[in-house]
Amino acid sequence: MKELTCIVCPRGCRLKIDDDLNVTGNFCPRGAQYAKDELTNPKRMITSFVRVKNRKDTVVSVKTSTAIPKGMIFEVMEEINKVGVDAPTHIGDVAIADVLGTGADIIITKNIE
Ligand code: SF4
């Protein structure tokens, strides 16, 4: 039996999951899925910054479009650190499509004119 806190929404349900992946303590189905994923294939969203090439000392905030496997966080961060974008940037622009084949895009989260 493993105990964990659901981080899918602010309610923060305390979950218990057994070796057969039976989940209790979840208020909604998303918590059960979260607990199963945590045991079998944990994933995380990433937020970071990308260099703006045509603006001196400027970066723009980015995030993954979906959660990526936890074990790939450092590799994905290396990819994010390699790229640069040109201003203007717009919320929702894709800085990296399908980063490292994860199915997640690196999305810009700030407008820079
Ligand atoms: S189980 Fe559902 S209600 Fe509870 S924290 Fe997770 S997402 Fe929120």
Image (tube, rainbow, N blue to C red):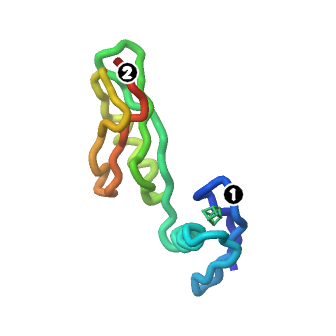
Name, please, the residue furthest toward the front.
28
Instruction: Check disc 1: other Cα within 10 Å, few if <14, some if 14-19, many if 20+.
Output: few
Q: Which residue is mark 2?
A: 112
Q: Which residue is mark 1?
A: 11
Task: Give amino acid for label 2.
Answer: Ile
- From the viewer's perspective, tell me whether residue 64 is left or right of residue 101: right
Residue contact between numbered discs 1 and 2, judged by CB atoms under 8 Å: no
Assign a secondary structure to mark 1: loop
Q: Nearer the viewer, mark 1 or mark 2?
A: 1
Residue 24 vs 92, above or below: the answer is below
x and y percent of residue 54 in the render? 29, 16
x and y percent of residue 4 in the render? 68, 66
Answer with the quarter of the image where residue 78 lies. Answer: top left
Assign a secondary structure to mark 2: loop
Q: Indicate which disc, 1 or 2, sits on the residue closer to the N terminus.
A: 1
- From the viewer's perspective, tell me whether residue 68 is left or right of residue 21: left
Residue 39 vs 71, above or below: the answer is below
Query: What residue is rendered at 58% in x and 82% in y?
Result: 21
Measure the alpha-carbon separation of dots 1 and 2. Answer: 34 Å
Answer with the quarter of the image where residue 7 lies. Answer: bottom right
